[in-house]
Each structure stands twice: as C-alpha cells, then as structure tokens.
Image (spheres, rainbow, N blue to C red):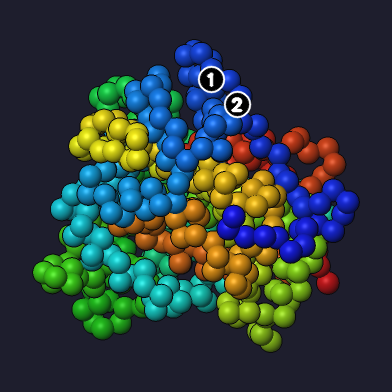
Amino acid sequence: MLDLPTRPARITQAGPFRPKVPPPLTQPLGLFAFLKKVRENPIATWMDAHFEEFVVAGETAMGRITVVSDPALVRYLLVERAAHYRKDDLQKRVLAPGLGDGLLTAEGEEWRLQRRTLAPIFSARHVSGFVAQMDAAGARLGRRLARRDGATVDVALETTRATLDVLERTIFTQGLPGDPDALGRAITRLLESIGPIDPLDVFGFPAFVPRLGRLRARPALRFFAEVVDTLLDQRKAALARGEAPHDLMTLLLAAQDPETGRGLSDIEVKANIVTFIAAGHETTANALTWALYCLSQDEAAQERVEAEADAAAGEDGALRLDRLPFTKAVMEETMRLFPPVPFLSRQALREDRIGRVKIPRNSTVIIAPWVMHRHRKLWDEPDAFIPERFLGERRERIERFAYLPFGAGPRVCIGQSFSVQEATLVLAQVARSVRLTLPADHPPVTPLHRVTLRPKEGLRMVAQRRS
Ligand code: HEM
C-alpha cells in the first residue's frame, strides 16, 4: 500500500467523497458492444481485472493489447526501454491535425533535438517567472465568477477561458499594437474549428479520408498562422533592439540546442506554439473543473482551500505559491481520480517480454493512469477523494511510477510544473472569490473520455460570492 489516510475527507458518516464513475465491467463485451462503448466512452470499457492485476494481455478489436499497471514494469517500459516503444499511430492520428511538427507529435531525431532545445524553457526558473501572469488570470476568473453572484455558471467553459487566458499571456505578453486580443481570438477560432475527437481517427481510417474537423480547421489554421507570423516578425524586431519581454515567444526564439547551438526554425516555433495551446489548455481546464467539483462535495477540503487561499494573499491580492500546499494537494488528488490524459499508448518496435508475458512486435502497450490511479493493489481507498495523500511525508511515500498524470520517461509532459503551478494559483484565486455549489437538480456528474476526461453532462454550479 502506498499510503494510509488519517482522516476521512468529509467528516460525515458516509466517509470520504467517492465520485460516481462508470463501474468496471465484470464480463468481456462482444465485438460490437465493445466498439459501441469505445465510441461512446472508452473509460467505460475497462474490466475489473484491470484494476486488480498488474498485466492484462489479450486480443481485441484493435489488435493485441497489453495493459501494464505494475509501477516497476511501467518504469521499464517508459524509461529503460523507451527507445523500443514509440507513441502509436492511433495517438498520432488523433493529436496530429493542426499540431504540425511540434514536440508532442515529433519522433526520432527530430523529437530529440526539439526536446533538448525546449526543455530549458520549462525549467523551474522560467516557469516561476510566470507566477504573476497565472495569478492574474486566476484573479480575473475569480472576479468574473463573483460578478455572477447567485447565478449558475458553466464551470468547464470558465476554466477553459482561464487556461487560454494564461497561455495567451505567457506566450505573448504584449498584444499587437492596436489589437491586443488578436492572439486570443485566433486561438479561440482555431480551437472551435478543430473540435472534439473524430471517431474516424479512433477507428483507424487512413489519413487521406477527409475529416470534417480538419476541413473546417483549414481557414482557422490559416488565420492563426497569419497572426502568429505577424507576432513573430514583431518580436524578432524587438529582440534585435534588446527590448523583448520575458514570455514563451521570446524563449522559443532564443532557444538553442545545448549540444549543437542550433535554434528553432520559424516553422518549429509556430508548431510548438500550437502544440502548447493544444496540449496545455483543455488538460489543465479539465483538471480545474474536476477539482471544483470534488471540492463542492467535500466541505472540509473546500473550507481548508478557502482558508489557505485567504492567508496566502498579500495586500495587493497576489498569491504566494509556497503558501498553498493543500490547494496543490487538491489538484494532485483530483488528477489521480480524473487524470486529464486517461491512457498512454505505445507501439512495440521489436518483440519484448515482461515476466511471462510476450509483447509481439508492432503490438500495442497501454499504460493507463485512469486504471493505475484506481488500482486496488496500489492505493488505499482508491476511489475516495483524500487530498491529504499528497501532503508531507505521505506524498513522499507515493511511488513515482504509480502516479502518472503527466506520463514518465523521456516523453514526460514538458508542461508539468507549468500546469501544476497554474492550476494551484487559479484554484486558490477562485476559492478566494466565490464558493461554487452543485445545484440539487444537476444531472449526475460522471466522466466522459474524449481526448481528455470531462464531465459527461457538463458542470453547472451556482456561484456564491465570498465576503
Ligand atoms: C493538467 C495538465 C496537463 C496534463 C495532465 C498533461 C499530460 C501530458 C501527458 C500524459 C503527456 C505524455 C503523453 C505520452 O507520453 O504519450 C504530455 C506530453 C506533453 N505535454 Fe502535457 N499535460 C498537461 C499540460 C501541459 C501544458 C500546460 C503544456 C505546455 C504548455 C503541455 C505540453 C506537452 C507537450 C509538448 C508534450 C509532449 C512532450 C514530448 O513528447 O516530449 N502539457 N502531457
């Protein structure tokens, strides 16, 4: 066992809060029922065995799949054998449209080069330089919600606005002269047109079959590219004058591969701007949405976050990040129960063996944070919301390869500290301004797995202004 809770999260007879999720299946589904379920909600296709055993291998409608949940084997696959497994085609088909050749979808030498070049941009030093922008975006969200005192708000929409706000201001601190919101508008149009995951991608139709989303995305992509081109030209001029502000665009333009000294081409800079937006906004927004939901169901944790946030604010209202350990623990526990990226998939480039299980060449290996984070051999009270797991000594007892919201190994999320810092600050700013409660007539809040994990029927909550 990784940890032992010392108090129930909600001091009621019912014990800690246990969010409602699709129950694991006890029997395998037939082919058509399986395909239908995968299409509706992939997380509803996991079986009891996945949450009880460390390796489950079998032939499926999508070929041979080995699901691995043993932390030691996950380490073996993602770290020691990383070179023998590559992100599989399914993931690339789903994620690649619009991402060009940014870090998320690049492979081989091109990926290695970009990763080396981009890693310093997301170092602790640079990320902590963005505290003010993130805190300000959180405060803007807090004010927006406080103005809606007594009204019902669409939480997923509001958190998405906040994470886009953060990206817009950390990528490009100054807007275009005369049009400060140009980048924000271009991002919104781009995201609206790419839309949700296309079922054709999941079912493996070849890339030449046109997809609605991609066709619709073309004009928006062009508009986006034009805005970013203009911003790039301006920034290069500012850099030449020695007047460039500290933001991701400056860092991207100045980045150099530490081994060769090579910088990024304009195309790579643009592809990575799209990548940071695509990889960073919905994931973080979903984590925040689930955190606000969990807090609304756990009064003790909600009060503790409010008290911590109030105490962490200086006279100007700005938050001190180091004074928000419990708020951060709430974010981490939320991403345990609702990992925004519920599974990672890899394709074996050569035959391998883990214990007695053979992994054939070209077969798929799945490492599913959704499964591992609720695995009965890995966690005490796996389905309960207990943020204290992530505090102090108990945090240290959590095995590195049992908790994988950001993946692990060479392809671990490059934006990990960026998004944890952002989510902690935004959650605390919201808690300072409003208390969000779930109306009694809200449909059940359960997760739906699209590219990320979101509440199936949305999340509408009533905002009550605090103080
Ligand atoms: C709660 C928020 C986030 C979660 C849960 C998350 C999760 C992940 C996961 C699981 C991976 C690894 C995928 C795999 O190995 O197959 C990943 C990769 C990546 N993430 Fe994140 N992410 C988040 C936020 C961000 C942000 C804010 C950014 C950028 C600003 C970002 C940029 C990336 C990039 C570029 C990669 C690819 C890294 C590589 O392949 O070298 N992510 N993310």
> Residue 84's quadrant in the figure?
top left
> Residue 306's quadrant in the figure?
bottom right
Give the residue displayed 54% in from the left and 32% down from the top: 49
- Asked whether, in this view, residue 138 is left or right of residue 245, the answer is right
Q: Nearer the viewer, residue 158 or 32?
A: 32
Residue 269 percent coordinates (x, y): 26, 59
Residue 354 percent coordinates (x, y): 33, 40
Q: Can you say whether 435 is above or below 64 in the image?
A: below
Inspect this view and state whether residue 135 appears: yes
Name the residue beneath numbered marker 2: 25
Name the residue beneath numbered marker 1: 28
Q: Can you say whether 74 is above or below 357 in the image?
A: below
Q: Secondary structure at mark 2?
A: loop
Q: Can you say whether 410 is above or below 317 in the image?
A: above
Q: Can you say whether 26 is above or below 448 in the image?
A: above
Residue 28 percent coordinates (x, y): 53, 20
